[in-house]
Image: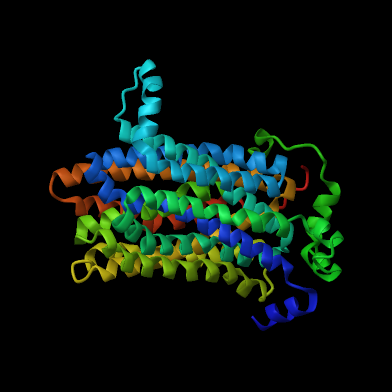
Amino acid sequence: MKKFFEINKKIGKYRWTICALLFAATTFNYLDRQVLSLLMPELVKEFNWTYSDYANIISVFQFTYAVAMLFAGRFIDWVGSKWGYALAITLWSIGSMMHAWGEFVGNTFSPIFAIFGLVIPVSILGFMISRFVLAIGEAGNFPAAIKVTAEWFPKKERSFATGIFNSGANIGAVVTPLTVPLIATYWGWEWAFIIIGGISFIWLPFWFPLYDKPKKMLAKGKITQAEYDYIHSDKDEQLIEANESKEKVSWFKLLTYRQTWSFVFGKFMTDGVWWFFLFWLPAYLKDQYGIEGSGVMLPLGVLYTMTMFGSIGGGWFPAFFINKGFEPYRARLMAMLVIAVIPLVVLAAQPLGIYSWWFPVLLIGIGTSAHQAWSANLFTTVSDMFPKKAIASVVGIGGMAGGFGGVFVSKIGGWLFDYYGGLGNVTTGYTIMFVFCAIAYLVAWAVMKLLVPKFTPITDL
């Protein structure tokens, strides 16, 4: 850490201002995403939804998010990070606020769906459409953020920077249970969507004057020549960029590389775990321990605070191996193997839950911390091996796979909870899901290692 401060003092630290902007955007991203899960018990009562109805609503978000990630990555590579990011956050803010008028949205669009023989209850349809808009906008966050990180940080700092901005997801997950139940209690659930969705707009006035590519910021005198040279100090990237063509890279071309499939499988296997905990934890606390409403503030606040430290610590962890002489990709895989073992503690959540609900909360907190540590490093494997012009596209492809994994997990979860809940034993449904969440990372790591056993940068794009 002493070396970190020495470097910043010597060459400058404007790149960390950029990281702070990414952190804020990711925080807003998860604020908007999580409002529905916290209001789920109240909305289920008001609209008479089943668990499967709720699973269908969140699956619309996850499926749309998955498909939109593919195009979002391409769009970000095409228009650039500056305008792409701004358009994404504007759209997802609008989508978040639309939930407040869910029944109106449902009534407006139900005649159109009826033409095709689709008769969906207006409350469910309205929330599905709102989640659809939210998902399209939110899909732009990570392709843009990973691309910006590759533009502004050398490889040895990328996972740390990714861990920092990715911890915004955890801050968002902490803030929402502290605010949403209170807003809903005093002003109604509609205002929770309106207020939380509207907050994201405050990011835009900071983004436009503070962000641009390093070369332009150097010309404007915003960064020093020393910091610019440090950002571009990776010799292998200099070679790749010198040889790369200016043509756009097709998705089909990217799918011919094992490196792409390694990232895709890692996202597919593990993103669903995060989605499960994000969308189903409030329901779990209600079903198993009778905790709901403002009562979820403390357990979720503690859990996601733990997760924030996992994200930042996981981003730093590969530096431990890099300092021992490992090249960045090998260091990243070693760190990810250690991280993949940690979620096994989730297997003890249900057995220990009979003594206190704090045991599952803390054990799941350790598991979600490991996920964020894993995620910070998984994203960085893309910038380790692909040229900058293709990074957002590859992240988009992997994000699509992760979204489909999330759809699969949510649908299975909804079915399990309805089935075992009908038998009066919903605990079994949660136990099955926790087993999957515990082992998913080791399976993902093994396949990734098999596909890309050593550092193999892409040099022919």
Evaluate whether residue 344 shows in this view.
no
- Give the residue drawn at x 39%, y 54%: 278
Residue 201, x across and y down, in percent: 56, 52
- Examine the image and state in which quarter residue 216 appears: bottom right
- The scheme the figure's colours follow is rainbow
Q: Nearer the viewer, residue 271 or 48?
A: 48
Q: Nearer the viewer, residue 162 or 294?
A: 294
- Give the residue drawn at x 37%, y 38%: 102
Residue 142, x across and y down, in percent: 58, 51
- Give the residue drawn at x 25%, y 59%: 292
- Give the residue drawn at x 65%, y 43%: 393
Residue sitting farthest toward the left: 424
Evaluate whether residue 4 shows in this view.
yes
Q: Relative to 207, is 178 above or below?
A: below
Residue 349, x across and y down, in percent: 28, 64
Q: Quadrant of the C terminus?
A: top right
Q: How many marks?
A: 0
Residue 66, x across and y down, in percent: 50, 40
Q: Relative to 121, is 387 above or below?
A: below
